[in-house]
Image (cartoon, grey):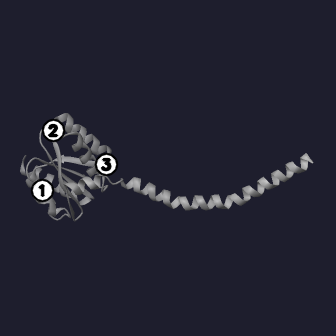
């Protein structure tokens, strides 16, 4: 790889780190092309990215980003997973590592907060941002639905009383 391409890659990675809400560092050794393609496909489906990286270039790209604290994780055959959603990359990486022993989650970071392997795995079990929004919307809508039901109940009871009274008059 020539020097210009390396500089371009460092700038590209720096931009990716600046936009990412989460970075997960993995060790991948012995993944086949098919397995790697499957992992990348899963990452794309979750709006995340996965890249096999050169450690020296990543360490240069980390400078000036909130993720500078994880530079020491880049030793050996590493790859990074990152996403704007604070859960997506972790979930896909952890799920894939459960299925395939060749991918090992080493750690990561969420902004300035460094995460160890257990922290990334705990993050992966959290619901996604969209799921949390849906739950919050359900909680907010529940009281309104209950209020509407309570307000409609007296009118419904009144209608049933009038109906019963009308049926009594017809029967008499």
Q: Earlier in the sequence, mark 2 or mark 3?
A: 2
Q: Write the residue at 58% across / 58% down.
A: 145
SS at mark 3 in the image: loop
Residue matched to label 3: 47
SS at mark 1 in the image: helix
Instruction: Assess disc 3: are there few (<14), some (14-19) or many (≥20) residues with their C-alpha within 10 Å of its C-alpha.
Output: some
Q: Is residue 172 left or right of residue 2?
A: right
Measured in 3D between alpha carbons, the distance from the residue under mark 2 to the one under mark 3, in whole angstroms, is 22 Å
Would you place residue 116 above or below residue 172 in this image? below
Residue 113, located in which quarter of the rendered image?
A: bottom left
Q: Write the residue at 61% across / 62% down.
A: 147
Residue matched to label 2: 31
SS at mark 2 in the image: loop
Instruction: Assess disc 2: are there few (<14), some (14-19) or many (≥20) residues with their C-alpha within 10 Å of its C-alpha.
Output: some
Q: Write the residue at 77% across / 55% down.
A: 159
Q: Can residue 83 be seen in the rendering of this structure?
A: no
Residue matched to label 1: 73
The numbered mark at residue 124 is: none
Residue nearest the viewer, comparing 127 with 33: 127
Q: Is residue 155 left or right of residue 78?
A: right
């Amino acid at each position: 790889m020539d020097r210009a391409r390396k500089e371009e890659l460092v700038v590209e990675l720096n931009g990716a780190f600046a936009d990412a809400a989460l970075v997960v560092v993995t060790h991948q050794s012995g993944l086949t092309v098919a397995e790697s393609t499957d992992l990348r496909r899963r990452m794309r489906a979750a709006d995340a990215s996965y890249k096999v990286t050169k450690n020296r270039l990543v360490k240069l790209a980390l400078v000036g980003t909130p993720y500078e604290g994880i530079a020491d994780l880049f030793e050996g055959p590493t790859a990074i997973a990152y996403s704007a959603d604070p859960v997506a990359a972790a979930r896909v990486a952890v799920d894939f590592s459960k299925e395939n022993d060749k991918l090992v989650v080493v750690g990561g970071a969420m902004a300035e907060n460094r995460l160890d392997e257990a922290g990334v795995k705990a993050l992966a079990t959290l619901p996604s941002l969209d799921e949390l929004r849906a739950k919050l919307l359900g909680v907010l809508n529940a009281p309104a639905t209950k209020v509407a039901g309570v307000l409609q109940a007296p009118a419904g009871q009144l209608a049933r009383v009038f109906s019963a009274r009308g049926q009594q008059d017809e029967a008499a």
